[in-house]
Amino acid sequence: METLLGDTRIATLVTSWGREPVKEAIREHLDALRSGGAAFSLDELAASVTFALGRSMRTTLTRVINATGVLIHTNLGRSPVSAEAWSGASELVSGYSNLEFDLATGARGKRHLHVSDLASRLFGCEAALLVNNNAAAVLLVLSAIAAGKEVIVSRSELVEIGGAFRVPDIIQQGGAKLREVGTTNRTRAADFEAAIGRRTGAILSVHQSNFQIIGFTEEPELVELARVAKAKKVPLVIDEGSGRVADLARYGFRRQPTVRELLAMGADIVTCSTDKLIGASQGGLILGRRELLERCAAHPLMRAIRPGKETFAIVGDALAAFLAGHHEEKIPIYRLLAASIDSLRERARRIADATGARVVACQSALGGGTTPAETIPSVAIAPAGDASRIQRALLGRPTPIASRVSEDRLLLDLRSVPPEADGEILAALTDLAGRN
């Protein structure tokens, strides 16, 4: 072993990876030779150890080019964060910061204050808390204000979203009891009013996210629910989910209330994700009445679900961009949404002309449960050949390219691809054409 470790090629690996991991990789290679009866080669040993260490000593997380046409793609990390935002955050995370330090007094401070003022100004609420995701936000709210009591929810909103997140389970974990009202397709404000009693802890309204109910339907307006909640002195909690700050109608989607509008219409608390329509890193915002949020902040669960300094930096940067009206310039998903069909077609034509692919019209989705069943026009590149084979080849590249297959045709939808990645798509399709 010492002789092998002393070889120049192996010694270089020891410098890079450490002595013990290299020794373990050598042992595994030698064991494989013994069991297979193969001859020993120092060159093969160095190559085998290099491969094994590269596979086991690095994270499997890697950058992916999203050409699926789904902008907020949960499997691909939801909304991308701008390089500018990360550059600014790096100054905070690479050294020390006043994360929990009051610069005015020199005493310990509270980390949630770093986004509370920004969020209060942006959403028009009394107070705000930041936790590590929206599921945690809902769990904390119910634990703090409704534990041991009933939470009233319409049957049409007892949803399950990605990752087996089920509203009834969250209510139970929060120590509350689910009280269902209405029917799957029709629920009225009177149903909530009739269900409220001494044991009621909250009314919970949940965005239906990844599905729609159509046909013979009815649901109460938020102002009606707010009126009932106020009259009965019961908190109205809205799990808005997506973090709708801006009106998406200008991009071609159906208009829905923004978070600010939900609060203005009478919601006591609104929760939402920060890595969907807010376009920041993973987090969950709790927005609303100061007295209720103080109860959330004082709850023991708060420490378990609080985010780190990097989340405060990135979310704060995104909120500031919305306040300044600069979200289309600074937040990537809004740059992608704002891209014109003409600009997408011109980008697609340049790539297609160089690779022999076709330019086709298609539809893109916003994703993330934000606008279920809605799409907007887009443009895609359709290379010739077997769609499944091309898809596998693109995923196998050093920088994988995720695509979609529609009607046995592979599509690279440019709505979800930033222009700076066009060169990588061109190179990938050129390589594929050269192999055929």
Image: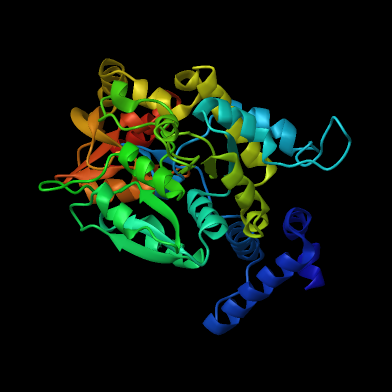
Q: Tell which of 327 and 352 is nearer to you.
A: 327
Closer-to-camera residue (194/51):
194
Residue 70, how many percent across, how many down?
A: 33, 39
Viewport quadrant of the C terminus: top left
Reply above or below: 374 against 23.
Answer: above
217 or 368: which is nearer to us?
Answer: 217
Residue sitting farthest toward the right: 106
Q: Is residue 68 visible?
A: no
Would residue 334 be found to the left or right of residue 287 on screen?
A: left
159 is higher (above) or lower (below) than 220: below
Which residue is rendered at x = 62% and y = 51% of the image? Answer: 295
Depth check, front residue: 343 or 102: 102
- 304 displayed left or right of 161: right
Query: What residue is shown at x 32% (from left), y 52% (from top)?
Result: 193
| Any part of residue 242 in sight | yes
Residue extending farthest to the left is 216
Q: How is the image coloured?
A: rainbow
x, y percent for residue 85: 60, 29
> What is the total number of numbered labels drawn onto the structure image?
0
Q: Where, by quadrant of the figure, is residue 120 drawn? A: top right
x and y, in percent, of residue 370 in the image: 34, 40
* Residue 150 % position (x, y): 43, 63
Quadrant for the N terminus in the image: bottom right
Q: Which residue corresponds to the image point at 36% horizontal and 29% vertical from the top-left?
A: 426
Direction from residue 415 to residue 398 in the image, left or right: right
